[in-house]
Amino acid sequence: MPDTILELKNIGYSYHNLSGETMALADITFGVTEGEFVAIVGPSGCGKSTLLSIIAGLMQPELGTITVHNPDGSLNYPRVGYMLQHDHLFEWRTVYKNVILGLEINHMLNAERLSYVERLLKDYDLDKFRDKRPSELSGGMKQRAALIRTLALAPQILLLDEPFSALDYQTRLMVSSDICRLIRQTGKTVIIITHDLSEAISLADRVIVLSNRPARVKTTLPIRLTLKDDSPLAARKAPEFQYYFNLLWEELTNEEK
Amino acid sequence: MRKNKKELTKQEEFVINRKRHHHQVISCRFFILVFFLILWEVSANLKWIDSFFFSSPSRVMNCLIKLVADNMLFEHVGITLWETIISFILVFLISLLVSTLLWYSQKLSEIMEPYLIILNSLPKSALAPLFIVWLGTGTTTIIVAGISVALFGSIISFYTGFRQVDPEKIILIRTLGGSRQDAFLKVVLPGSVPIMLSTTKVNIGLALVGVVIGEFLAARRGLGYLIIYGTQVFQLNLVITSIMLLCIIAMIFYKAIQYVERKINKTFVE
């Protein structure tokens, strides 16, 4: 039984302005085990991104507690890597300077980290493009560069906030399949937010469905696809795919009645 | 083979057309200048205009030669150039400092907003007499006048540029564990280089305006002083020569900034 790495208990959060408060999250409770790939789906505007910002430590929850368990038993908060919707590579830096941005900020430009970055650049076929500007890369290569930038800090948990939604559909299928294969290879714990049900089913071990705002956990659905080839593109052809899709679709839509 | 050749000629045609266009623009510019100078000279000689009031290119030349002979040209041009460059550099540094502070503190920027807007729209020439009373006549007053014309607009432009940086990029810095200072140094400042350059281009011209206003009122040297002096003694040749020199200075400044801009864009923004 793998260890729980992340535990959220009764998380609540509201946005405030002068005309009143808007409750975004109400009583969110779930745990994530180490090495698990979790997808969070929910109606648009339900507070998914707020939840991710809280897990990333960018925002403090107003209610509830969030606990992170380190696998080595220490109390240090493991680094949480957060990939945003857009790659946000800086045009005034070369690809290489972009991927070491996190190390630069954290003053960790040491030999160990830099050789890790070198390895990632080679593994992800970006080595030849290291001195190019981001605008010279394709959409998929930009996402890979953004992934290296996140992985360079060696996070234990990866958060992805609709990381492919800025891409056109065809590129999106390719890139999401590609990036998720790469992430799976790292064996890291992943939480991905998406509004694309097929994406959630094809990528995740478990799908968490959130309700309309204020968001609560409606259902948790473990995904078991009977396919030996675990590439996300192939997963869409699994016999159970449609079953899971309908199940999730029901969950998401029955609220509106 | 044949097709390849045809494509090549299309490309060549395009290059030739572009070059022709460029040559036409340059020669037309030159033609307007020469035409204007000739028209001016001829109308003065044929007494269509009164050369006492309107001067003429040959009189301007004579005046220039006289200024050089009296060893005065470089002194006056030099002092105006020097004061303008100092004002310009100070404007850049002060705007950078103030707009950085405004960016760091949302509250400070909200407090300062109406004051900045009032100071920016105030005609700075109205302040110049005050500067003389406060600072006396001399280089300091003139440099302050130069700064006052460009400074507030420059602060507003820099700050606006800083604010226009994509907030998601700042969130990115935070997700990588960066502080507000990291956000400023890694995103806001490099992301604002284009707007800072275009503001700087305007600033050099405004600094020159301010310096000439200052020299009108509080100088014994400089092109602004020559213009006022020339008007007082009815030496309009001197006035027009000084104005011509100002035109040349303005053009040199513009070209210099353009050169720097290209250089920075090449190495920095690509």
Image (cartoon, rainbow, N blue to C red):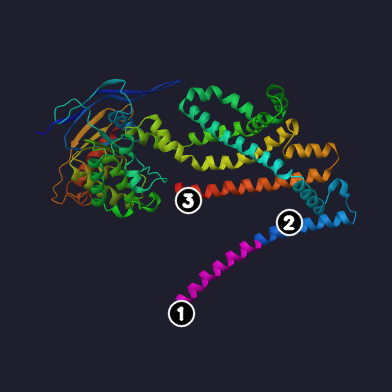
Indicate whether B261 appears above or below A208: below
Point out the tag, 1 or 2, that comes first from the N-terminus: 1
Point out the tag, 3 or 2, that comes first from the N-terminus: 2
Residue B76, visible in the rendered structure:
yes
The span from disc 3 to disc 2 (Cα, nearest Å) is 32 Å
Find the magenta span and give its range: B4-24
Towards the viewer: B21 or A161: B21
**Picture coordinates of residue B108, whole percent (x, y):** 51, 23
Q: Which mark is residue B2?
A: 1
Specify the amino acid type for callout 3. Answer: Lys
**Picture coordinates of residue B26, whole percent (x, y):** 65, 60
Relative to A150, B209 lies left or right: right
Q: Is the magenta stretch mostly helix, strand or loop?
A: helix
Towards the viewer: B110 or A86: B110
Q: Residue B129 carries which label?
A: none
Indicate whether A147 appears above or below B58: above
Disc nearest the viewer among 1 and 3: 3
Point out the tag, 1 or 3, that comes first from the N-terminus: 1
Q: Mark 3 points at which residue?
A: B266
Q: Where, quadrant-wise, is the C terminus of chain A in this rendering?
A: top left
| Crowd around label 3: few <14 · some 14–19 · many ≥20 (10 Å) | few
| Chain to which mark 2 belongs | B
Q: Mark 2 points at which residue?
A: B33
Residue B23 figure quarter: bottom right
Disc nearest the viewer among 1 and 2: 2
Specify the amino acid type for callout 1. Answer: Arg
| Chain to which mark 3 belongs | B
Let me know if residue B16 is in the magenta part. Answer: yes
Relative to B223, A8 lies left or right: left
